[in-house]
Amino acid sequence: MYSIGEVSKQTGISISAIRYYDKEGLLPFLKRNESGIRLFDDKDLDHLELIECLKKTNMPIKDIKQFFDWYLAGDSTLKNRQALFHQGKKTIEEEINKLNHVLETLEYKCWVYDIAVENGSLDTYKTIDNSLIPDHIKEYMQKKNLPK
């Protein structure tokens, strides 16, 4: 069993956030000692990890609570829980796609400015030999219809 402080250190989740999750019913199996102090076991740590995972999909707390309600309701809610996870996965895939586009732009701009700084002029990249342009930069330029 772990104290709330130990759990906070172990997970990186603030004590106030853990208390909030408990208050909102997101830790349905959490035990307390005779003094009312929260006692966490490994299953509670797994639940906290899942809560943090679902939060990263921008899922509202009320929807995370719904998941735990479905979980407690048993197998009759398997399809609901499946749909929730598939939606979370879709959300993250869309975010990754957006971030990959951002990364491509930043890689291109880094390349342009690396060449500019190296040669003392922003226009230098426009005259660079095509064979010296990295393939991923060429692909980006073609995709964006950028002139060399």
Image (spheres, rainbow, N blue to C red):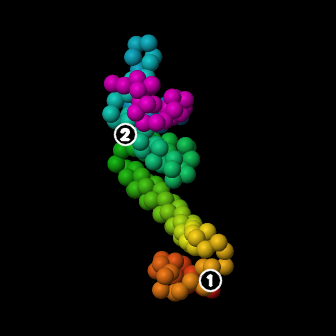
Instruction: Note whether 90 is above or below 20 in the view shown.
Output: below
Instruction: Note whether 135 is above or below 14 in the view shown.
Output: below
Gap in angstroms between the C-alphas marked 2 and 1: 53 Å
**What amino acid does circle 2 point to?**
Asp
**In the image, what residue occupies the spot 37% across and 50% down?**
76
Helix, strand or loop for the magenta stretch, by majority: helix
Q: Under tag 1, what secondary structure?
A: helix
**In the image, what residue occupies the spot 42% across and 52% down?**
81
Other-residue count near label 2 (Cα within 10 Å), few / some / many at <14 / 14–19 / ≥20: few
**What amino acid does circle 1 point to?**
Lys
Residue placed most toward the observer, 9 or 111: 111
Residue placed most toward the observer, 58 or 73: 58
Q: Which residue is mark 1?
A: 126
**In the image, what residue occupies the spot 55% across and 29% down?**
16
Residue 87 seen anywhere in this rendered image of the structure: no
Quarter occupied by the C terminus: bottom right
Q: Position of residue 34 (x, y in %)?
A: 40, 13
Q: Position of residue 22 (x, y in %)?
A: 49, 31
Q: Which residue is mark 2?
A: 46
Instruction: Note whether 19 is above or below 54 in the view shown.
Output: above
Quarter occupied by the N terminus: top left
Q: Under tag 2, what secondary structure?
A: helix
> Closer to the observer: label 2 or label 1?
1
Q: Residue 20: within the magenta?
A: yes
Give the extent of the magenta segment. 1-21
Q: Of the numbered discs in the image, which one, if any, rests on residue 89?
A: none
Which picture quadrant has residue 120?
A: bottom right
Side of 13 relative to 77 (left or right): right
Other-residue count near label 1 (Cα within 10 Å), few / some / many at <14 / 14–19 / ≥20: few
